[in-house]
Amino acid sequence: MSHSQIETDVVIVGAGPCGLFQIFELGLLGIKAHVIEALDKPGGQCAELYPDKPIYDIPALPVIGAQELVNNLMKQAEPFDPTFHFGHRVHSVVRRDDERWLLTTDHGKQFLAHAVIVAGGVGAFEPVRLKLPGVPQRDGNSIFYSVKNPELHRDKDIAVLGGGDSALDWALDLKQVANSVVVIHRSDHFKAAPASVTKLHENCDNLEMQLLTGNVTALDGNDDSTEKFDLEFIDVTSLDGITRRVELDHLLVFFGLSPKLGPMAEWPATRKKNQFIVDTEKFQTDQPGFYAIGDINWYPGKKKLILSGFHEAALAAFAIKEQLNPGKKASLQYTTTSTLMHERLGVDNPYAEDEIAA
């Protein structure tokens, strides 16, 4: 066995709301899980695309913010001590002769599991790329789509593209370490939090930052294939057609994220378009031990709702419990009254079943 290979009963692929609730449902049945997530944090679309937006259709919660929902799901999963593997994307899924599944990530980490639950939403999220000649060669050298180490940009002249929260948050943060910061956005309207927009304008008024309205239309720098593809200038063309040349070292692009199936498109199990076809008893695909919940699955009447995914997670958990214990029916116990459930949750409850008269 490889030193990097992890053996477990269940692997959950995806840490969006449905994947997080799947941890809870498995935990109630005494099953621990490893969770593989391509992003560097939990939450999926809720955390990446609309963390501040309200959600109105979660039962018993008239309104809850998307990030708050994620935070609550993480807290709910805490008693079951899940192991998260953030920043890993599953590249291959292979069913072995012993009927276990071997999953390998893009970092070479391997997982050997009896059951796999794909809760990958509409796929892994990838940054929307800047589409100009010379961009791919500079990826990771002078053009970046995320900030992993702010010190990399210390004393550099940087330009930040975008008008959302990520763009403005990083522009304001990197002002503390960079030599200069220029924010470039295609319009005067920002999608970022109003407080961040106000702070940006205050910094510009104080000549501590610069704001340009327009689009990057050309790169200029060292294109020699033997060099590191440094950037020296970019051309920014405004809506009135005027082009300005901006001197810089690093270009940070925050155009948002888009879902990509990526390697998932090659995984086993039959699909309908980009969704895995599942039954509605177990939410299992046509491959034994391979399940799918949330937006990534399809069945007649499927609705892409978080609350639907929660229901699917519950039934998938019971199916996996029975898969792991052949011939033994998984009993239904209620968290309100079951002493076993309370033990697993780590809570005391005066209404436990052994204290209730028949």
Image (cartoon, rainbow, N blue to C red):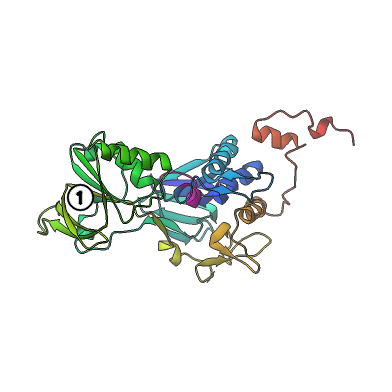
Q: In this view, does 335 lie to the left or right of 97?
A: right
Q: Which residue is drawn at 57% across and 42% down?
A: 73
Q: Nearer the viewer, residue 73 or 221?
A: 221
325 vs 242: above or below: above
Report x, y in % for residue 233.
14, 53
Q: Can residue 146 be seen from the camera position used here? A: yes
Quadrant into which the C terminus falls: top right
Report x, y in % for residue 324.
63, 51
34 vs 98: above or below: above
Q: Residue at x 51, y 43 (%)?
A: 67
Q: Nearer the viewer, residue 255 or 328?
A: 255
Magenta span includes 43:
yes
348 vs 335: above or below: above
Q: Is residue 27 left or right of residue 203?
A: right
Report x, y in % for residue 1.
41, 48
- Quadrant of residue 182 within the rendered picture: top left
- Quadrant of residue 245 within the rendered picture: bottom left
193 vs 132: above or below: above
Q: Nearer the viewer, residue 246 or 73?
A: 246
Count neighbours of disc 1 (C-alpha within 10 A) and say few if under 14, some if 14 to 19, many if 20 or more: many
**Secondary structure category for the residue under label 1:** loop
Magenta span includes 11:
no
- Magenta range is 40-47
Q: In this view, does 46 lie to the left or right of 110?
A: right
Q: What residue type is labelled 1?
A: Ser
Q: Can residue 141 be seen from the camera position used here? A: no
Report x, y in % for residue 339.
74, 34
Q: In this view, does 350 lie to the left or right of 231?
A: right
Q: Nearer the viewer, residue 130 or 163?
A: 163
Circle 1 is placed at which residue position?
Answer: 142
